[in-house]
Structure formats: structure tokens, C-alpha cells
Image: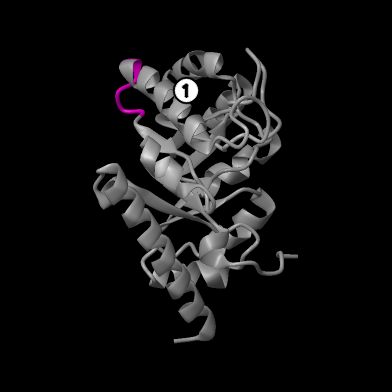
Amino acid sequence: MTDRKAQLAANLAQVEERIASACAAAGRKREEVTLIVVTKTYPASDVRILHQLGVRHVAENRDQDAAPKATACADLSLTWHFVGQLQTNKVRSVTSYADVVQSVDRAKLVTALSAAAVRGERELGCLIQIALDAESGERGERGGVAPDGVEELAAAIDSTPGLRLDGLMTVAPLAGEYAGRQRAAFDRLMEISSRLRAGHPAANMVSAGMSGDLEDAVAAGATHVRVGTAVLGVRPRLG
């Protein structure tokens, strides 16, 4: 086993233990939570090692890094998640490799994703990104739609060809009433998810929690956690 593979295996084991413990504490089954490893800034060689170690879900936030990496790993059975703020001029590229876009936050993006998915004869999973720090009708600094804009966006995704409404995503906010209160933020996300599922029962995916707060996300009920640093460590950026 190479040094890098040994390092990643050890890190993965620690993260797995954290998720398993959080599930046990919350009275949840371990299989209810999916680990997504955020591989942004790390090379395709790491993605290959992660696949050898059993990882099947990876995430990227910059198309210029993700596109060549996805191409280099096209032979692997992986589900690719795009989690960054997405400009419409990058949509065609992103839809060529991403299975799920977790950062859908405006109607213009829905239209662009649909056109690209239909052109590529693909069905693209979509998560609505919630900005818990946004005022009514506004978008947060990290992207995302205000909670009161969710239903309108959900209806747009649900009625648009090439797209599948999978659920919700959030990043614990740095400002506003939920700043520094990750568990409260994730509880609020679950409330919004419950309302969404009343009208869209299949939209049951809730992506929340990262390296520093995955336990809070699992306790609140998240179905997917996005972990980067705790698995991959701190390494020089690509490029």
C-alpha cells in the first residue's frame, strides 16, 4: 500500500467512525447516511485511490478542475456531485459529467441545466441550495435561495425536462441568526425539507454537514454529508 493510500484509508476510517457514532447517537441506521468526499483541489490520482477504498460519491465545486478530473476517471463507477456556485456559461460542461447538481438556486439556472441535459440526453439530479442567511427573496453570499423561494424553484425543476428534483442542500451560514449554530441551521433545513416533501415526496435527499460539523448534520437528519479535509487532508492546490 502506498503512503498516500494508507493515509487516505486511515482518514476514511476515522470519518466512517464519526458517522457511525453520530448515527448511533441519533438512533439512525448507518446506511441512512451517504458519505460524499469533496475532492476539489486534489488530483485524479486521489479519486482513483478513494474508489479503490470503496468511495462511490465524490464532489467538485469548480468546473475547470472537475471536468478534466471526471474525464480522467471516466472508467470508474462514481456518482459526481457539483456543489459550487454555478454560472450558466459552465452548465454545458458540468452536465456532461455531473450526476447531481447540489447548488441550484435560481430559475435561470434551471432553464440552462434543462437545455444542456436534454441536449446531452441525460437526466440530471438537482438539489435546491438553501441560503439560511438570506433575507426574503434574496440570495446568500455563498449562493442559495431564501427559504421562502424554495417552492417556486421546486415547481420549476419538477416541471422542466431533463431534470429530477432530488431534495435540498445547505452550507452552515457564517452570518445571520444561524451563524455558529450549526445544529439549529440543520434543524431548520429539515423543517424546509419536510414541507418540500409534502408536495414532492421523492425529493427526500438532504445534503448538509462538512468535516467540522457532520455530527450536527447527522443528528438533524441529513441523508448526505460532504467531507473534504477530514478525508484528504491539507495538500497544495491544483494548478
Q: Total of numbered circles in the picture?
A: 1
Q: Residue at x 65, y 49 (%)?
A: 63
Q: Which residue is mark 1?
A: 157
Say which of 174 and 54 sits in front. 174
Quarter of the image where the C terminus is located: bottom right
Residue 123 in view (yes/no)? no
* Mark 1 residue type: Ile
Where residue 84 appears, x then y in whole percent?
A: 62, 42
Its colouring scheme is: one colour
Q: Which residues are magenta?
A: 199-203
Q: In the structure shown, which secondary structural element does the residue marked by tag 1 occupy?
A: helix
Residue at position x 61%, y 57% in the image: 40
Q: Is residue 202 magenta?
A: yes
Work out whether 144 lies above or below 137.
below
Determine whether 88 is above or below 25 in the image: above
At 52% across and 50% down in the image, what residue appears? 97
Residue 180, percent from left and from top: 60, 37
Residue 111 x, y percent position in the rendering: 57, 24
Front residue of 19/5: it is: 19
Of the 4 image quadrants, the one containing the N terminus is: bottom left
Q: Is residue 91 above or below residue 114?
A: below
Q: Residue at x 52, y 39 (%)?
A: 101
Q: Main secondary structure of the magenta part?
A: loop
In terms of depth relative to the viewer, which is nearer, 24 or 88?
A: 24
Say left or right for 99 vs 197: right
Q: Position of residue 130 (x, y in %)?
A: 55, 27
Is residue 51 shown in magenta?
no
Asked if residue 115 can be seen in this view, the reply is yes
Quadrant in the picture for residue 51: bottom left
Q: Name the residue at the right extreme.
A: 239
